[in-house]
Structures are given as structure tokens and as C-alpha cells.
Image: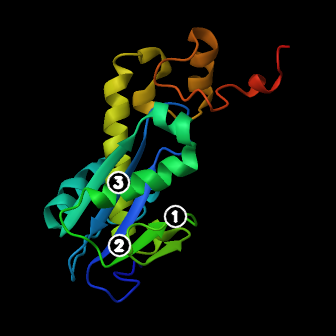
Amino acid sequence: MLKFNYSGFSLEVGTDEAGRGCLSGPVVAAAVILPKGFSHPLLNDSKQISEKKRMELRPFIEENALAFGVSFIDQVEVDEINVLQASITGMQRAIAKMNIEPEFIIVDGNKFKPYKDIPYETIVKGDAKFMSIAAASVLAKTYRDEYMEKIHNEFPAYNWKKNKGYPTKEHRNAIREFGATKHHRKTFKLLPEQLKLKL
């Protein structure tokens, strides 16, 4: 059962990201402040619910949230600052996009950096514990999936509309056959055999 609030502050924002473990595409982060009494029977960690249910939840979250923000950190920036920094930066940018400044931040995971002077807490598996983080996970995942489906049309060989850029066998085989695209993260180990250096 998801809890509504961690800090006791009414303007508590939950934040999460999607796409950290992908070989291609952006890291997408979202931040959500929910009103007291918010509930939806489908709401859970986005990994626990189907794509169809996530798409059903998204407009409900956006219409009922007190505030939300979504930010994209593209693959070029992911390569520049590394994927952990991209996740933190993305979550901070998503919070900055909201039209309400939160009083407290709860973060999915165990890493974050101070944002303004707002107190925060990192919560491992927070998306399965708190509603606002679960809602943020749904937004981050649906916005990212939509983007990956769009760039799939440009490079259909990699089947991003299905694997969303994750390192599936099919995705890696396509990289092996066709090479990396401009959407791939150059600092990631795209293929297992990259470990063998050709000196």
C-alpha cells in the first residue's frame, strides 16, 4: 500500500527518472506534488504496471496533481556528465519546471544533491512506497517511451518502440550489424565484446 506523505509538509514533491540503464535515448525525470486525498486504484511503481495502464494514469496524474514537471537529459549530456549526474540533474530540472516550489523533496533511489535550500530524503524503492514518487515514475516512463517510439521511426532496425533502448539481445544485435546511431550513448558499453580492446 503506497503512503501519501513522508515529511508531514503538504507541498512534498516526489521525483523519479526513467532510462538510466538504456543504451540509447535520454534520461527522463519527473516531479509531482499530489493533493491530499489523491488516489487511483492503478497507481503503483511504473515497472509494476502495464504500458496501457501507465498511459491511462498519465492524464489523471497531470489533471489532478497540484504541480508536475518533466525534463529530458539527452544522450549527449548523459555522455558528458555521466548517467548518475544526469539522473540527479534531470530530477532537479523537473522540480524547477513546476509552478509551485516544494517544501520537501522525496527522491527515488539513494543519491541526490541539494536543490536550493529545500530539505530532501532519498528513499530506496521509493516508487513502490510513496504515491508522489510512483506518480513521477509513471510520467517519466510514459514520456520517455513516447519519445523512444518517435525516434524508432527514424531507426526502425533497433526496434526501440519495443525495447525502448534497453540492452536487449535484439538491440545489441542491431548495434552489431548497423553500428551506433546519434541516439546511442557513446560512453556506454554498447556491446559485451567492447571489453576486448583492439590495440
Q: Nearer the viewer, mark 2 or mark 1?
A: 1
The residues tagged by marks 1 and 3 sit, at their Cα atoms, a distance apart of 13 Å
Q: Residues within 10 Å of mark 3 (few under 14, many from 20)?
A: many
Q: Nearer the viewer, residue 54 or 100?
A: 100
Say which amino acid is labelled 1: Phe
Q: Name the residue carrying label 1.
A: 112
Mark 1 neighbour class, 10 Å CA radius: few under 14, some 14 to 19, many 20 or more:
some
Q: Which residue is mark 3?
A: 93
What residue sits 47% from the left and 68% below the top? 114
Measured in 3D between alpha carbons, the distance from the residue under mark 2 to the one under mark 1, in whole angstroms, is 19 Å
Vertical comparison of 72 with 54: above or below = above
Which structural element holds mark 2?
helix
- Amino acid at dot 2: Met
Q: Would you say the residues marked 3 and 2 are in contact, meaning their CB atoms lie under 8 Å apart?
A: no
Picture coordinates of residue 177 (x, y %)? 61, 10
Q: Which dot marks residue 131? A: 2
- Which residue is at the front of the view, 157 or 106? 106
Image coordinates of residue 3 in percent, x first then y, are 39, 81
Dot 2 and dot 1 residues touching (CB under 8 Å): no
Above or below, 59 relative to 1: above
Work out whether residue 22 can be spotted.
Answer: no
Between marks 3 and 2 in the image, the one whose residue lies nearer the viewer: 3
Q: Secondary structure at mark 1?
A: loop
Residue at image position (49%, 20%) is 158
In the rendering, at what x and y percent does residue 140 appear?
A: 36, 51
Q: On the picture, is 128 further left or further right than 145?
A: right
